[in-house]
Each structure stands twice: as C-alpha cells, then as structure tokens.
Image: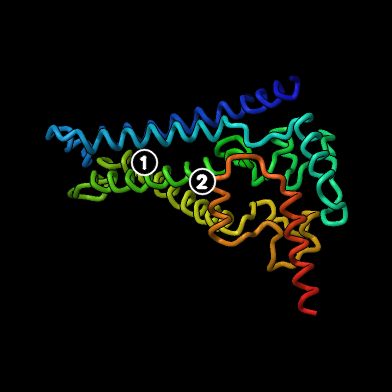
C-alpha cells in the first residue's frame, strides 16, 4: 500500500504539475491565436462552414487528452510484492546459466526484472524502461510506451495542420515593418509550431525504429552499461523477433512480459545454431 501511495505522489509531484500546466497553456494559446487571426479557420467560420474548425478543435482536444493520459499513466513502476513474485516464478522456470544474475536496485533495493531501470526523477524502478521524458514529466516504460508513440503521431498531425493554418493567415503589406507589426503574434506562434513539429518528428522516427527492433532508448544509448547486453554482439539483440513480430508485440501485447524467459529462449536458440554450424 505504501509503495502505491509513493507511486501516485511521484506522478503528481509539483514539478510535473507546472510542466503539464505550461503545456496546456501553450497549446490553447496557439489554438486561440489560429482562431482569432485571419486564417482559414476564421474565414471558414465567417462563411458558416464549421466542419473544418470543429475537426481541428477536436484534434487539439484529443492530443491534449493523450498528453495527460501518457503523462499521468503508471509507466510500469516495479512494486515490491509484484517484483518479488514475478522474479521467483521466472527463476523457478529458467535454467540459472541462461540469464544474467538478477540485480538488486541500489536505490530502492528491489530485485529488478530484466530491462527494468531505476529512474532518479520518479524515484522508482520502471519495467522495460525507455527514458524519463521531461516533456510529460513522467517515465516512458512498458505500460505507457505505445500510448506515448500514439501521442506523438497525433501531436505531429496536429502541429502540421496548425502550421498550414498559420501560413494561411499571412498577407502582403507595404513595408516589412508594417508586415511584422501585423503578423508578429502569428509569426511567433508559427515558429513555436515548426520547432515542436521537428522535435516530434525526430522522436517519432526514433521510437518507430526502436519498436521495430524491440529495443529501448536506454538500451540503445547505453548498451555497454547494460549487464544483459555486455556479452551480446553489437549487431544482435536477445529480444529481437523480426520486424512484424516486434511491431505486433509493441502495439498489441498489453500484459507484462517476462523478459528473462525471452532472453533464455533466444540464448538457447543462438547456442543451438552455433553448435549446428561447427
């Protein structure tokens, strides 16, 4: 019970509230600018054509709801009782020599399931830890990784549409100074939208690749520091099952995975292939 209470407190810590409030204010400020300036949205409203403005508004609402979902979700925090029970079950079914020795976290002193890592910002170990995202003030892990990628997709679509709308609001002026005075606010909004679009696009491409090879950001960036990957060749992964199966597992498997079993099965397969090739 105390572990669950600490988990909730870490999700709703004050720094996270400020980040979420800032994201919400920025999102609706830019949306308001796009509706108030002489853009396609406003011209559609003036003509009585409300479908496009309504669809854009609903898309913004959906992106905000997804943001709060991934931000407030449990990313897969390792709780004491669950971690102990799952590891005891895994160890009883897997030969000891096929997987690295189970590590105990040096911060919360829990036995870490394979692919878990302690997050100093959240104060918990996270299953299939990917990274701690300051944008959502939460970890991205086993339980919310797919929601995070879905959020990136919706956010990118929203930002690209917002860029198109903002560009439609610019009109010629007699001088550059008068043009800047006329469009300063809209230009600032467009600049923010373009920068955010590039960031989200890069993130989406990176996570799309990682999902396709069943890897995490932590494993990819710090492979040499990950105990269960130190003895694995650089071009191999103990969790890679091929493109289609990796994407299926990422998008459709919603249960906790015993990665120790996957690792052991992959290790036995590799050893069998090596012996067969001798």
- What secondary structure is marked by label 2? helix
Q: Quarter-wise, where is residue 36 in the image?
A: top left
Q: Position of residue 100 (x, y in %)?
A: 84, 53
Q: Quarter-wise, where is residue 134 in the image?
A: top right
Which residue lies at the image location 35% right of the left edge and 45% below the top edge? 190
- Which mark is nearer the camera, 1 or 2? 2
Q: Is residue 192 above or below residue 230?
A: above
Residue 193 located left or right of residue 148: left
Q: Position of residue 107 (x, y in %)?
A: 82, 36
Towards the viewer: 69 or 193: 69
Q: Quarter-wise, where is residue 79 in the image?
A: top right
Residue 187 located left or right of residue 21: left
Which residue lies at the image location 33% right of the left edge and 33% below the top edge? 58
Towards the viewer: 224 or 199: 224
Towards the viewer: 54 or 114: 114
Q: Is residue 152 above or below residue 238?
A: above
- Residue at the farthest bottom position: 278
Which residue lies at the image location 58% right of the left edge and 39% below the top edge? 144
Q: Quadrant of the C terminus?
A: bottom right
- Residue at the farthest left position: 47
Q: Position of residue 188 (x, y in %)?
A: 37, 42
Callout 1: 10 Å neighbours few (<14), some, many (20+)? many
Q: Which mark is residue 149?
A: 2
Q: Is residue 137 above or below residue 206?
A: above
- What secondary structure is marked by label 1? helix
Towards the viewer: 188 or 264: 264
Q: Which mark is residue 189?
A: 1
């Amino acid at each position: 019970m105390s572990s669950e209470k600490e988990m909730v407190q870490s999700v709703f810590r004050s720094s996270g509230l400020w980040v979420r409030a800032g994201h919400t204010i920025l999102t609706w400020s830019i949306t308001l600018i796009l509706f108030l300036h002489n853009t396609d949205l406003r011209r559609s409203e003036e003509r009585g054509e409300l479908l496009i403005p309504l669809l854009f508004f609903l898309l913004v609402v959906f992106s905000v709801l997804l943001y709060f979902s991934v931000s407030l979700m449990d990313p897969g925090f390792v709780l004491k009782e669950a971690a102990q029970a799952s590891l005891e079950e895994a160890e009883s079914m897997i030969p000891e020599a096929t997987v690295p020795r189970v590590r105990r976290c040096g911060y919360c002193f829990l036995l870490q399931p394979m692919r878990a890592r302690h997050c100093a910002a959240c104060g918990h170990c996270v299953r299939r830890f990917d990274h701690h995202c300051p944008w959502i003030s939460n970890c991205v892990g086993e339980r919310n990784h797919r929601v995070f990628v879905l959020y990136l997709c919706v956010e990118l679509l929203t930002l690209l549409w917002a860029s198109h709308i903002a560009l439609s609001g610019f009109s010629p002026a007699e001088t550059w100074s008068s043009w800047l005075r006329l469009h300063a606010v809209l230009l600032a909004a467009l600049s923010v939208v373009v920068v955010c679009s590039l960031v989200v696009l890069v993130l989406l491409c990176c996570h799309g690749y990682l999902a396709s090879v069943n890897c995490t950001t932590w494993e990819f960036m710090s492979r040499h520091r990950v105990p269960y990957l130190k003895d694995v060749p650089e071009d191999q992964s103990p969790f890679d099952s091929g493109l289609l199966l990796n994407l299926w597992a990422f998008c459709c498997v919603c249960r906790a995975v015993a990665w120790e079993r996957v690792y052991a099965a992959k290790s036995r397969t590799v050893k069998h292939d090596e012996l067969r090739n001798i």
